[in-house]
Amino acid sequence: MFFGLIILLRVLFVACMVFIIGHVFGSFSKHPRLRVFTKIAVILAIVLFISSNILFFRFGHARAGHYPAYRTHCTYEEAPHP
């Protein structure tokens, strides 16, 4: 589920970049409907960028073992042998 969400965010981000590049370098700015889609794409790109960073930082640390519930190592120390 989480992996599918990452793929969906990346695909939407790429689609937004296509609209923005088409507006800057192409003829999207000449057509009124494409101009509206480009404005929506800019807002969506900002939201997707922020939300994907939040998700990556939130779940990236959980897998690295920074939270106590996800720790896999043992803190038991053996007594030294005499």
Image: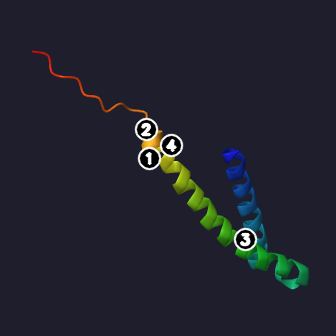
Frontmost of labels 1 and 4 is 1
Q: Secondary structure at mark 4?
A: helix
Residue 44, quarter of the rendered image: bottom right
Give the CA separation, mark 3 to mark 2: 36 Å
What residue is drawn where x is 67% and y is 45%?
A: 3
Q: Amino acid at mark 2?
A: Arg
Frontmost of labels 3 and 1 is 1
What residue is drawn where x is 89% and y is 84%?
A: 32
- The colour style of the image is rainbow
- Dot 2, crowdedness within 10 Å: few (<14), some or many (≥20)? few
Q: In the image, is residue 46 above or below residue 1? A: below
Give the CA separation, mark 1 to mark 4: 9 Å
Mark sitting on residue 71: 2
Task: Evaluate whether residue 17 shows in this view.
Answer: yes
- List the residue tagged with mark 1: 67
Q: In the image, is residue 46 above or below residue 65? A: below
- List the residue tagged with mark 4: 63
Q: Mark 3 touching mark 2, by CB under 8 A?
A: no
Give the CA separation, mark 2 to mark 1: 7 Å
- List the residue tagged with mark 3: 44
* Front residue (pair 64, 68): 68
Where is residue 69 drawn, in percent x and y? 47, 41
Residue 53, quarter of the rendered image: bottom right
Where is residue 12 drawn, in percent x and y? 75, 61
